Amino acid sequence: MILGTRILILGDTGSGKTTLAKDLSIKLALPFHDLDDIYWEKKYTLVRMLPMRLRMLLRIINTEKWVIAGIPRNWNESALSSAHHIILIKRTRIAETLRVIHRFLKGKRAGQSPNKLWTLASTVYNKFLPPSKTRILLAHIKKQYSHKIIIFQSEKQIRQFARNVKKQT
C-alpha cells in the first residue's frame, strides 16, 4: 500500500499504535509525534493546559509530513481532517491488556515504577469498564472518516502492513 505524508494512528492504551508509528516514521522518513508528549506537561503526572495542547498540535499538523500516534480525544480532532490516512488499531481488550501488563512489568513507562500496582490495576480496570470512551470515539471516527480509514485488529495484520507499505512519490 502507498501512504500519504500525513498519517494519524489511533488506538486504545496497549494497542501498538506507538510501535507502528515509529516503524512507519523510519520506513517513510516522516517525523514521529506522540500525542502523549503534547497532552502531558510532566509525563503521566501533570496535564498540559488545553490552549497549549492545541497550539502544539496545530504546529505539527500544519506541516506537510508527519506520523502522529495517540488515543483519540476531542482536543486532537483537528489532526483527523488534516491526515491523509487514519489508521485505527482495534485489538481485543485482552490483547491490549496483556501488552499493558507486559510494558508495566518491564517498567517502560517513564515516571512509573513497577511497584505502583494501583496504576496497573486502574488501567486494566478501565480496559474492561464498558463503555470505553476510546472505543466510542474510534467508532465515531470510523464512520465520519471512512474514506481514509485503515483498520487493524491483530499483530499479524500490523506486521504485514508495516512490511509492505511504500512511500508516496
Image (cartoon, rainbow, N blue to C red):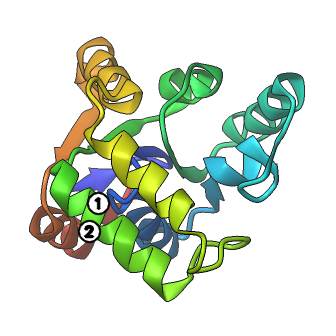
**Does dot 1 land on a helix, a strand or a loop?**
helix
Residue 21 visible? The answer is yes
Residue 54: x and y, percent? 78, 27
Note whether residue 169 is visible: no
Dot 2: few (<14), some (14–19), or many (≥20) neighbours within 10 Å? some
Mark 1 burial class by Cα count in 10 Å: few <14, some 14-19, many 20+: many
Q: Which mark is residue 58?
A: none
What mark, if any, has residue 98 been given in the picture? 2
* Number of marks present in the image shown: 2
Residue 47 or residue 82, whichever sits in front: 47
Is residue 169 depicted above or below 164 in this figure? above
Task: Name the element at disc 2.
Answer: helix
User: Amino acid under label 2?
Assistant: Leu
- Residue 124 placement, left or right of 162: right
- Please name whichever residue, 125 or 107, is drawn nearer the observer in this view of the structure: 125
Which quadrant holds residue 154? Answer: bottom left
